[in-house]
Structures are given as C-alpha cells and as structure tokens.
Image (cartoon, rainbow, N blue to C red):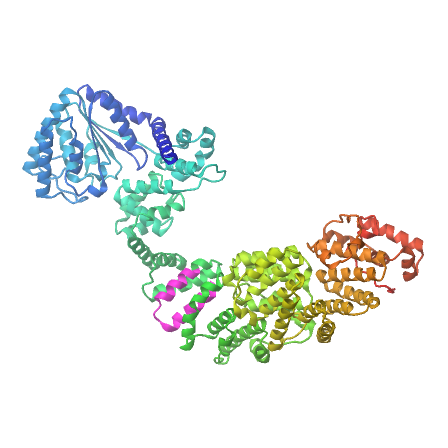
C-alpha cells in the first residue's frame, strides 16, 4: 500500500511539474500554436512545426495544444514517430488515422495504402529519392495506386473538416517512416483550403542537401515555425519550485542549470534524484533518474547525434569533431552538426559532458560487444594520432583486447607511468591485459613479475595468484635478477622460505653484475629479517659486498648508524620494504625508540600519500610495536587496529604477527581480557611460527597467559619462542627477552631454582648496552632475593629502565619497590613509590595495571593526583629546573625527608625547603606526591 501511495504521489508531482513547465518560458510558444488553431477554425488551413533540442518540451507543448483544441470541439488525430519502426511503411499514418471518430471509409483507404507499401516496399530510411513529377521538394516518388488512395483520403478528411476543425498532430517527425512523411506533405498541400491544422514536432537536424519536410515547409506562407529552447537559470528555478520548496529550488538553481543545461527533461530528473536522496546539504547526487533521462534524450534525438554522443563518451571529453567523425565514419561537418545539436540540447558544454556520470549512462545502452568494439576502434585511432599511452591504454582496457605487439607495448609503458604516479589500480589493469595478450614468453615473464610487484603494493594475496605463473617462468629460466628476487621475496612473505630460489648467477661484469648482487642482497636481508636465517647470516658478507662497499657491523652504534642511513635513503615503493623494516627493528632493539618512532611516522605519512597500502600497513604495525615499548598503549592499540584495517589479515602472510602481537600486549596490560581473547581468536598461518613474527606472537601470548594466571601455558609459549630463536641461531635477549617471561612463570609455579637459571642466563647473554633487558632482568632477580636486598636491586633496575624509556617495565619496577618498602615497614616510601607507579600507569593508559601489581592498596595516597598537564608540558617544566633543584626534587620524589635530603646533598634544611618551593612553583604543584613520574629518580646514597 505504501509503495502504491508513493508511486501515486510521484506521478502527481511529475504532472504538476509538467504543467508548471508549460507556464515556465513556454507561454509564447503555446500562444503561437493556439493562434494557428484559431485561424484554422476560421476556415484557413495551417501547418505549424515545433522545433528545438531534444528533451526541451516540444511534446508537452504539442499535447497542450491538442487539449486546447479538443476543448474547443476539434477532432484531434495524434501519432508519434518511433525510430525502431521507421522501416514500417505508413506506420505513422496508420496510427494517426486509427480513430473511431473518422468516417468508416477512412480505414479502407489506410488498408489500401498499407497494401501498396507491402507490394512496393518502403524506401530505406535516410536515402534521398528524386521527386516525382508534380511532387513537392523532397517528396518520395508515388505510384499511381498510392496517389489514388491518398486523393480519396484527402476527400474523406476534407469532409470531416467541414463539420468541425481537424487537428493532425505528429510527434517526433524525424523518426517517422518515409512513406508517412510523404503522405503528410501530400495531404498538407491538398488541404490548404480546409479547416485542417497540421502540427509537427521535429527534433532532427536539417538534411544536408536541403531536402526533407522541414526544408519543404520553410518557404510555405501557411507554415509557422515555433521554437522551444532550453530553460534559462531563472526558468530552472521556477520549474524546481514546482517540485521542491522555493528556498531549496532557489539554492539549487545554479547547480541544476550547470548540470542540465536547462533541459527540462533533465531538470525533472534532477528533482527526482534530489527527492530520492532526502535531506542532503551537499551537492545533489546524480542517480538513476538522471541517467535514465539522459538515455531517453539519446533515444529521441537524431540517430547521428546519438552516435556522436556515444563516440564522445568513448573518446572522452574535448575530443575534436574530426576524431568523432573518424570514429563514426562520417564527414567532419556532419560530426560537428551532431555535436552542436547535443550542445544545444544541454547535454554537452563546450565539447564535454556536463557530469562524469554521463559517460556511463550514455554507454549503458550499448551491447557489451558493441561497447568493446567502440573502445578498440578508439584505441587504434588514438594510437595512430600519437596520443599519450595512458589514453590509448584506457581504451584497450575498456575493450578488454590488446590486438598485437603494439598494444602490449602501450599497456606496459602506460602501467609503468601510472605506477610511478601512484595510480596502481589502473596500472594493474593494464598489466593484467598485457599478460593475457602477450605472445612472447620472455616478455610475458617480465610482465608477470611487474604485475606481481604492482599488486603487492596494495594486496599481496591478489599478487600471490600470479606466483604460479611466475614460478613456471623461473623454471624455464626466463626471470631476470630483479624478477627472481620478486618471486623469492613473495615466497618468503608467504612462509615458503624452503622454496626460496638460489642466488642468481651474476651477469657480465658491469651493471648486470651489480644489479644481480643488489637484488640478491634484498632477498638475503629479507631472509634474515623474517626468518632469523643463519644461512642468510653466513651469506650476508657476500651479499653486502655485491650490493656495495662496507660489510656487516657488529657494534650497536654502527648498527644504529647503518639503520639511520638506510632509512634516510628509503624510497617508498622503490626500496625493498624488508630493508626499511630491518632498519626500524635495529633502532628498536638498540632501545632507540624515539628515533624508530620518528622514522616510522615519516615513512607511514609518505606511504599514505603515495597510496602504498602494504607499506603503510606494515609500517603502522611496527609503529604499534614501538608504542608498546614506549608504554603508549592507547597509541599501540590505535596503530594495530589501523594496520589491520588498511591491510586485511589474508594479505599479511607471516607478518600478521606484527600487529597482532602489539595489540595483544596492549589489551593484556590494560586489562581488557575480552579484547585480548578476540585477538587470540584471529587465525594465523602456521608458517608464521617459523619466523621472527611467530616469536613475537608467542612472547605476547605468553605475557597474556601470565596476566590471566595460565602459568603453564605461558611457560610453554616462552619456551617455544626460545626454541625458535635457538634454532635460528639468534637467541639474544635484545631481540626477545623470553627467559624473563619464563622466569616469572616459574616463580608463579614455585620453581624458584629454574627461575633463577632462566634469569641468570638472560643476564649473561645481555650486553652492557642493552639496558632495557638488564633493567627488567633485575626486577626478577630482586623477586628471587631476600627482602632486605630488593630495594637496592630495584633502584638499579629503575635507573636502567628510566634511561631505556621502557615505561611499562618501569611501572612494574616502581610497584615492586613499593611492595619491598612496605614489606620492610617503610610505609612512607612505599606510598611514594606506589603513587609514582600509579601516575606513570595512567600516563601509559593502563590505570588498572597497578591494581594487579600492588597487593597492598593501603599504601596508595588517598588524595587524587594533581593534573599536571600533558607529558610534553611536564617534560618542558622539568627542563627548567636547575641541577640543584633537580637533585633535591629527585630525592623528595622517592620519599626522603628534608633532613635526609640535606644529609645526602650536604646542604641545610632551609636550603632544601627553598629548592622545593621553587620546584613546586615551576612544576605548578603543591605537594611531594604530585612530583611528575618523568622526574629522574634519585638513588639512595647518590651525591
């Protein structure tokens, strides 16, 4: 019921709009036709021709006249020319005279005329015929039998007009069959003195040779031409006001006029789309109504103009008339006339469609095969004219054909250019077609590798579909060094490390040799990065020698410098992604989290700007891992979510462990157990557990199991992580400190001796510069030791962790120190340490962390901490403290009294008080408990 009501309402709106249209800039035309009818009713035969562009209201004006004449008592005969029926001889005349109000003899004459048409055959549409003797200009030669029937028909119509005026109304005369047109001209010439008004609408172009009904009627003194033009902007506003509210109509008038050119049919469609879209503040969406109206215009306009519109839709905007003519196989003048007719109708504006959606709407009426043929013809023409390769390639892709080597070359060059401009989707379309069409095996191999590289930028899973073909080319020995590296890197990403091809043999000395070495070095680095591959480490020196001067360095400083250099020279889409990843991990493992974050953010921004989806996702995943190290858990969660949204899980291959591990840690530390379970429910490829990312994932899962009390499951994951690292020959705590997690699990299980073994091994394997690992290890050593020794060990751990910037471990160390002081009965210091732990946990977006770490909630200061502003502001404020003020503030922050601070620093209590007063003022606080967590902690006994 509701649908019926909506349809009725829409029909009423359209009728109201049509009546409004006749009141908008059409009164003069309708008045001219009414005057012609009044003259006919007075006894003078007349003819009127309504001309104008398609869709501009010729039919509506004609129907309005017919209604006016019928009300005045006239006999109104109507018919419409239909393009699809132009081959039916006398089809229009048959429809015109099929009226029960005419005398019975009329039907007999019409049947006789149809019989002559069947016997003689109607002249093909569009073919000019020489005029018969005595016939009017442009009239088709007439057989005697046909002429006799028409004379008798004239008598019948003349007799009918004696009793009341007769109106003969034919719409779309340009689509009428030729015999009917000739008959109408014959009737007009012989009914001049009768009360007969003939009204014709004709939207076609004048015949080039000056023939046709319009040419014949042009010099007729009894003929009146009435022209209907597109609406002005004011007229568009008036017409819209009948469909929309006046305010909306006035606001949209300029937009509507620019989109429709004032064509009333398109204006109504614009209003329909606006009403369908509902409340909409922005630009009116171009929808189905507009597209349907555009196709209606093409169906009703001259066939040549419709073909010109399709040619322009294929060729693109601003195609010259000469190119349109070549597309259509017509003369330039004819093409120019057709384009001018489309412009006059409002469909074109300065040689282009008024909206991009018009291209698809125009071509939607073509059969698929016809549309492809048109695009292929356009491709050939553009290629012959030396058009840009991208323009030719677009036509070939639309045609889904590449006929010959020239087309394959065009597609490859266009793909390379589009990829360089970061338009990967179209580049991939070009390469897909080129691969299918290419007949040369070597070139097809190169094209396939290029396609894999292109697809990898946005969807590795789609690129993987072509690896089978690339592997076949590799077996045939058709891959270059670069293409072989492409295949090897893709295999590694998918977890097929065992299949990785051997190092390609270098070519002749010179550029080929250097290229082979460089590409082999990329594969070697990727194997080291993804798989901690010992074989790759053994081969690294050789690979680095091929790639350029300098070999692998072992010192942390040299590794950091090399990483910075690599990142400075990284070019998104050109440098191997794995090289950038390795450099970022080098900074991360050297505890240079600030530098790693800076470079990661820089590269993510560039990858986003260049629409390098895979780069952006992987780097964003690493950024989440960096945020975890920095203790910025909200940032870690956001980056991990973004990484998985940018690149779906099926595209990650073995690297899916990067964002999942970071998000799992963030959810675990912040106490969001359900979210962590959803992360664990994400399916991962089994091959991941043989890679670095599998190790990261196992370690993150082990931490989660620790947090939820599944200690044996945690210990198993930590051990599996250690076994993987040992198997790969990279069992170093700086990479993953799995022994620390295993020791914590053992402590919980009561295996103190085994816990001591794990943490002792970790300390032995940690280099002095790996302060983060050593600091976290000292936490566990303190937990294993006697209560009286814990504060000193934890103070050392806190110092190292603060220097390393590991805020999460620092929260744990502060909480441990609070518990140690509480156990020793030093409740004041316990409360101070607990307060600092809580504030730091809040800064890490993990306020619930201390609830799990502090078993003695009574040690917490009941007063809420002061709001000291964002972390950046606090750091700036701390930087304003003098050295003396900083030393006093550091000791005060860990619970020392003023007298104890004075003894430690060899200053008076009054001096301590003065320093603290200035510290409070600079930091904008009022008590010791509000001293910021970022303040370097003072060690007992430090001078």
Q: Which residues are magenta?
A: 427-455
* Percent of width and height locating residue 63: 27, 29
| Quadrant of the frame with the N terminus | top left
- The residue nearer to you, when weighing 641 against 89, is 641
- The residue nearer to you, when weighing 220 against 755, is 755
Q: In the image, 811: left or right of 87?
A: right
In percent of the image, x 38 and y 38: which residue is there? 260
* Percent of width and height locating residue 299: 28, 42
Residue 74: image quadrant is top left
* Percent of width and height locating residue 738: 66, 70
Residue 587: image quadrant is bottom right
Residue 376: image quadrant is bottom left
Q: In the image, 454: left or right of 811?
A: left
> Is residue 155 located in the magenta-colored stretch of the structure?
no
Q: How many marks?
A: 0
- The residue nearer to you, when weighing 873 against 393, is 873
> Is residue 433 located in the magenta-colored stretch of the structure?
yes
Is residue 605 at least partly visible in the picture? no
Residue 796 against residue 94 in the figure, above or below:
below
| Quadrant of the frame with the C terminus | bottom right
Q: In the image, 47: left or right of 794?
A: left
Tell me the chief SS of the magenta region: helix
* Percent of width and height locating residue 725: 62, 74
Residue 933 against residue 483 in the figure, above or below:
above
Q: In the image, 14: left or right of 462?
A: left
Q: Residue furthest top?
A: 42
Is residue 836 at least partly visible in the picture? yes
């Amino acid at each position: 019921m509701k649908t019926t009501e909506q349809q009725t309402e829409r029909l009423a709106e359209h009728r109201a709009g049509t009546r409004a249209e006749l009141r908008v800039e059409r009164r003069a035309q309708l008045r001219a036709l009414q005057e012609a009818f009044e003259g006919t009713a007075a006894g003078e035969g007349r003819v009127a021709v309504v001309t104008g562009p398609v869709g501009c209201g010729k039919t509506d004006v004609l129907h309005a006249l017919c209604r006016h004449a019928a009300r005045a008592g006239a006999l109104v005969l109507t018919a419409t020319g239909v393009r699809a029926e132009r081959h039916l001889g006398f089809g229009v005349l048959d429809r015109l005279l099929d009226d029960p109000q005419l005398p019975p003899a009329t039907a007999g004459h019409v049947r006789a005329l149809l019989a002559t048409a069947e016997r003689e055959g109607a002249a093909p549409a569009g073919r000019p015929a020489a005029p018969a003797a005595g016939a009017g200009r442009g009239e088709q030669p007439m057989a005697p039998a046909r002429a006799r029937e028409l004379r008798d028909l004239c008598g019948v119509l003349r007799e009918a007009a004696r009793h009341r005026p007769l109106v003969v109304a034919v719409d779309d005369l340009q689509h009428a069959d030729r015999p009917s047109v000739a008959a109408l001209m014959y009737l007009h010439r012989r009914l001049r003195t009768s009360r007969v008004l003939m009204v014709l609408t004709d939207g076609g172009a004048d015949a080039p040779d000056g023939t046709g009904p319009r040419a014949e009627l042009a010099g007729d003194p009894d003929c009146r031409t009435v022209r209907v033009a597109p609406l002005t902007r004011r007229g568009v506003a008036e017409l819209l006001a009948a469909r929309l509210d006046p305010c909306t109509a006035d606001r949209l008038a300029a937009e509507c006029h620019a989109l429709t050119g004032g064509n009333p049919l398109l204006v109504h469609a614009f209003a329909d789309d606006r009403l369908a879209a509902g409340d909409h503040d922005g630009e009116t969406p171009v929808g189905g109504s507009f597209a349907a109206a555009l196709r209606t215009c093409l169906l009703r306009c001259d066939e040549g103009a419709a073909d010109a519109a399709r040619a322009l839709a294929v060729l693109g905007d601003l195609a010259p008339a000469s190119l349109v003519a070549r597309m259509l196989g017509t003369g330039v003048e004819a093409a120019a006339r057709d384009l001018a007719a489309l412009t006059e109708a409002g469909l074109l504006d300065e040689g282009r469609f008024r909206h991009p959606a018009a291209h698809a709407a125009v071509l939607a009426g073509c059969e698929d095969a016809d549309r492809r043929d048109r695009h292929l013809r356009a491709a050939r023409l553009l290629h012959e004219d030396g058009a840009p390769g991208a323009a030719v390639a677009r036509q070939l892709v639309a045609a889904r054909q590449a006929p010959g080597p020239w087309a394959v070359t065009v597609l490859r060059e266009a793909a390379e250019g589009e990829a360089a401009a970061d338009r990967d989707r179209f580049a991939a379309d070009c390469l897909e077609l080129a691969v299918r069409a290419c007949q040369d095996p070597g070139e097809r191999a190169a094209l396939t590798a290029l396609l894999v590289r292109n697809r990898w930028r946005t969807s590795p899973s789609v690129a993987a579909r072509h690896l089978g073909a690339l592997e076949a080319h590799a077996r045939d020995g058709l891959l270059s060094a670069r293409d072989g590296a492409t295949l090897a890197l893709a295999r590694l990403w998918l977890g097929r490390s065992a299949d990785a091809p051997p190092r390609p043999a270098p070519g002749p000395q010179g550029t080929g040799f250097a290229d082979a070495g460089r590409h082999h070095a990329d594969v070697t680095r990727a194997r080291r990065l993804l798989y901690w591959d010992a074989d790759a480490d053994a081969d690294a020196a050789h690979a680095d020698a091929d790639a350029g001067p300098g070999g692998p360095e072992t010192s942390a400083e040299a590794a950091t410098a090399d990483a910075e250099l690599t990142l400075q020279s990284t070019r998104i889409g050109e440098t191997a992604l794995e090289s950038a990843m390795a450099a970022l991990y080098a900074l991360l493992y050297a505890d240079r989290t600030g530098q790693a974050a800076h470079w990661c953010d820089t590269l993510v921004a560039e990858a986003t700007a260049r629409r390098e989806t895979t780069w952006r996702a992987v780097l964003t995943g690493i950024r989440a891992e960096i945020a975890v190290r920095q203790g910025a858990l909200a940032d870690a969660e956001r980056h991990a979510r973004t990484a998985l949204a940018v690149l779906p899980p099926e595209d990650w291959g073995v690297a899916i462990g990067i964002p999942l591990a970071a998000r799992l840690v963030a959810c675990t530390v912040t106490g969001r157990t359900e979210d962590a379970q959803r992360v664990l429910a994400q399916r991962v490829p089994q091959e991941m557990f043989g890679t670095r990312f599998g190790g990261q994932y196992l370690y993150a899962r082990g931490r989660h199991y620790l947090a939820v009390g599944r200690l044996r499951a945690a210990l198993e994951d930590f051990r599996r992580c250690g076994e993987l690292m040992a198997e790969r020959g990279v069992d170093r705590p700086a990479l993953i400190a799995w022994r620390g997690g295993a020791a914590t699990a053992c402590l919980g299980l009561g295996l103190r001796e085994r816990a001591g073994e794990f943490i002792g091994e970790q300390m032995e394997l940690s280099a002095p510069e790996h302060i983060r690992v050593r600091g976290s290890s000292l936490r566990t050593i303190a937990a294993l030791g006697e209560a009286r020794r814990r504060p000193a060990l934890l103070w050392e751990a806190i110092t190292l962790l603060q220097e390393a910037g590991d805020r999460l471990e620092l929260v744990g160390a502060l909480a441990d120190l609070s518990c140690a002081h509480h156990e020793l009965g030093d409740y004041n210091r316990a409360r101070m340490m607990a307060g600092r732990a809580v504030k730091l946990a809040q800064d890490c977006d993990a306020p619930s962390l201390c609830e799990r770490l502090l078993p003695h909630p009574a040690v917490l200061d009941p007063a809420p901490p002061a709001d000291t502003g964002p972390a950046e502001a606090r750091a700036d404020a701390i930087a304003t403290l003098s050295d003396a003020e900083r030393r006093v503030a550091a000791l005060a922050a860990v619970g020392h009294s003023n007298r104890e601070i004075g003894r430690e620093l060899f200053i008076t209590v009054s001096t301590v008080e003065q320093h603290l007063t200035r510290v409070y003022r600079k930091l904008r606080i009022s008590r010791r408990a509000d001293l910021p967590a970022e303040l370097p902690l003072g060690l007992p006994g430090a001078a």
